[in-house]
Image: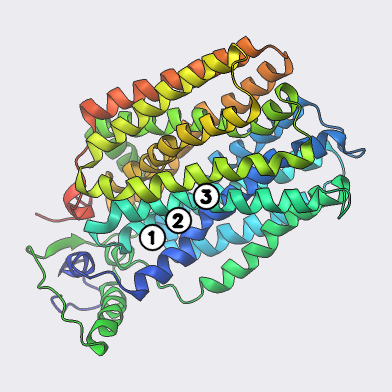
Amino acid sequence: MTPEPHHARTFDTDLPARLDRLPWSRFHTLLVFALGITWLLDGLEVTLAGSVSGALKDSPVLQMSNADIGLAGAAYIAGAVLGALFFGWLTDRLGRRKLFFITLFVYIAATAATALSWNLWSFLLFRFLTGAGIGGEYTAINSTIQEFTPARFRGWVDLTINGTFWVGAALGAVGSIVLLDPDFVGSETGWRLCFGIGAALGLVIMLMRLWIPESPRWLLIHNQPDEARRIVEGIERHYLERGIALPPVEGPPLRLQARDHTPLREVFTSLFVVHRRRAVVGMSLLTAQAFFYNAIFFTYALVLTDFYNVPSAHIGWYVLPFALGNFCGPLLLGRLFDVVGRRVMISATYFISGVLLAISGWLFAQGLLDVIEQTLAWMVIFFFASAAASSAYLTVAETFPLEIRALAIAVFYAFGTGLGGIVGPTLFGQLIESGERFNVFIGYLIGAALMIMAALVQAVWGVAAERKSLEQVARPLSQVP
């Protein structure tokens, strides 16, 4: 980096290229573990909400109906939407590090309060606040991980991290099996302890994040090049101390114009004028996967209890294989997103997911599947759908400029999840309440159609971002020619 006075507004830097050339190391592993565990929390939350739905209906305090269960899912998603927008805006202004602590604190406090809910409305409020914390986590964490991960690993890392949602789902399933067992705790106390698991885990994660530095890329555009250089040199020192030679830095340095913040007018011009095709792609991918996932998974337990007569205390056993398929999809397919490429793999996983859901939905409507076969069908479908959904977050995080990355994630997550995630659980709650298999099949067809349309949009307008630096994929707004 060219030495500049502290007050300088324009400077040359090679720090992004130095981060991209790094071999994978213990630093990256620890970073991914400490930050990526956010998806584990979300998986835990969603699974607990689904797994304890039977206990919530049986609760003498809450006395929730199927429609109330769908409403609780919608409240959680609404919180995630508004939390993503508000905290995403703050993440770009105040920094990645500050916000991933603030959002985690909101999550811990809200999920602990959920365990103490005294009526339906208090439960809905605390689920809303829990969603706000998780939505904010998505924006802060996605941007941080993207900005530290070397370009050649970015696709696989991002998909695998998003896949850990299902590790949380498995933990939630096991927790519900134990805590809802009447011989152990019982449903009324058990569902409260289930939400307490999330708060306790959040406290552990808070401690794990203390060592993580601020993103050097964020520091650069906020006129802190010296601090950014110190962080990158500290990372490089770990390699030199172990005798690992670093590859040469490729490409010319960037010339950046530092700024305090990016005006909202410039944000929306960049998102919806300069990069409008990318905006359509991001909106399509996130809306389709949000409806697909939230509609089905938030009401997963209701399908099992209402149509297959599975006892609510046994729901967790059926969540485990479902979670396994979801986790293995990004883990096993993720590397192909860097090798084969984004455009082909994203389109393929979306298309396959939609077709398989339509087929299994028809079999469900005809009553041709027993509960084991239904679970296996969902396991196969979501092997592909999980990789597809994870790639949606990868796409919106890497295809927009650095200065607005967190807010871009928030905007598309909010619109996509708001359209697909709020409507989905509410609609499916009503469809299941009808007790008619064909009505539920209609909901499955809607989800399948959205996934297939998103696949077509991605095939036409998707960006080939594999193995490219973030600055190559989307030119920084602060870059000077």
Residue shown at the point (58%, 53%) measured from the top left: 168
Single out the mark in the foreground, 3 or 1. Answer: 3
Residue shown at the point (11%, 65%) measured from the top left: 253
* Residue 388 screen position, x and y as percent: 38, 37
Q: Label 3 crowding class (10 Å Cα cut-off): few <14, some 14-19, many 20+?
A: many
Label 3's element?
A: helix
Residue shown at the point (29%, 80%) measured from the top left: 230
Which residue is label 2 attached to?
A: 140
Label 2's element?
A: helix
Q: Any mark on residue 165, and which?
A: 3
Quote the CA–CA distance across marks 3 and 1.
18 Å
Label 1's element?
A: helix
* Residue 51 screen position, x and y as percent: 71, 41
Circles 2 and 1, Cβ within 8 Å, touching? The answer is yes
The quadrant of the image that shows the N terminus is bottom left
Q: Label 1 crowding class (10 Å Cα cut-off): few <14, some 14-19, many 20+?
A: many
Q: Label 2 crowding class (10 Å Cα cut-off): few <14, some 14-19, many 20+?
A: many
